[in-house]
Amino acid sequence: MKKASLIVFFSIFLGFFCFAQQTKVKEAHDTFDLIQVPFEDYGYGWSYITYVKPHYPAGVSRDIYEKIWNCYVKTIERGDYDYDAYNKRNEGDPNWATPIDEYKDDVSFHFHGVCYQYADYFEMLIKKEPALKSLIDKGILHSETAPSHKYWVYQEPDGVKYFIDPTWGDWTIFGTPRGQFAGWIEMERKIEQSPARHLLTEAIMRSWFFIEADAIGAARGPNEVSQRNWERSGHNLEDRR
């Protein structure tokens, strides 16, 4: 094995080893786990944040799963969630949309947007994969919309439905969050500065990839009922309250 290949191999191995060593399962369920991820080092111990980790779907081939995951990662890496656009839309500004020009599938392309731009960019990527394009044509992989939100789902023939949401898997914030999201920019800064940021980022991304309905909102505590409802209503699982 060449030196470069060895470096890549051991880097990947170390990443999985560190993730396994520094995360703990808080609650184990049939289709997901609530996991504790190290968040902030106070010098005398870690604080933790709980995220959902979906289980690997038994009815989906690993090749298909990985192809979709790669498109999901690209979408998140190339997008910044734009709260200025989001706020303008809520205020009724007809020019709320952030111009993103032509979609491009290359590492130099970057866009600001909200859920619609994320979902559309994700669609552009998955349509470039013949195996995924055929799933779209069959309706197995398709987009759905909820109040002010757009996301993707993978619908198995036996009825099992997996939610794929690149928008909510991204913590890269642009603009000024308001209202119930006002504290999110502080959260993003702490994640960016955390020594465990790769673990936090991985957990956040996994929490919105191939996640079943009963796992959405599961990480929310008793004081986060409104946030739980927001997440579930944003995926047509509850009425917006």
Image (spheres, rainbow, N blue to C red):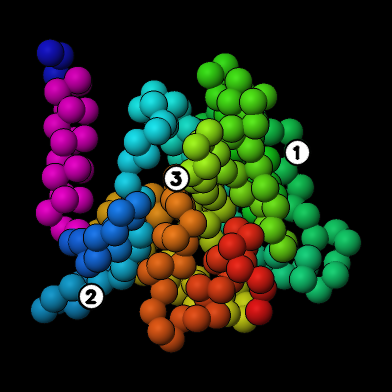
Furthest residue toward top: 1
Residue 125 seen: no
Q: Main secondary structure of the magenta part?
A: helix
Q: Residue at x 44, y 26 (%)?
A: 64
- The C terminus lies in which quarter of the figure? bottom right
Between tags 1 and 3, which lies in front? 3
Q: Position of residue 112 (x, y in %)?
A: 64, 51
Looking at the picture, how far across and down is residue 22, in whole percent? 16, 58
Q: Is residue 38 left or right of residue 227?
A: left
Q: Which residue is mark 1?
A: 101
Which circle, 1 or 2, is nearer the viewer?
2
Please tell me the numbered disc located at residue 47. Answer: 2
Q: Amino acid at mark 1?
A: Asp
Residue 210 tag number: 3
Taking depth in this image into account, of 240 and 156 the one nearest to the observer is 156
- Helix, strand or loop at label 2? It is strand
Question: Does 126 appear above or below 199?
Answer: above
Task: Confirm or deny contact between disc 2 and disc 3 (CB under 8 A).
Answer: no
Q: Which mark is residue 63?
A: none
Task: Give the alpha-carbon distance from disc 1 to disc 2, as whole Å.
Answer: 41 Å
Reading the chain from its start, which is encountered first: label 1 or label 2?
Answer: 2
59 part of magenta stretch: no
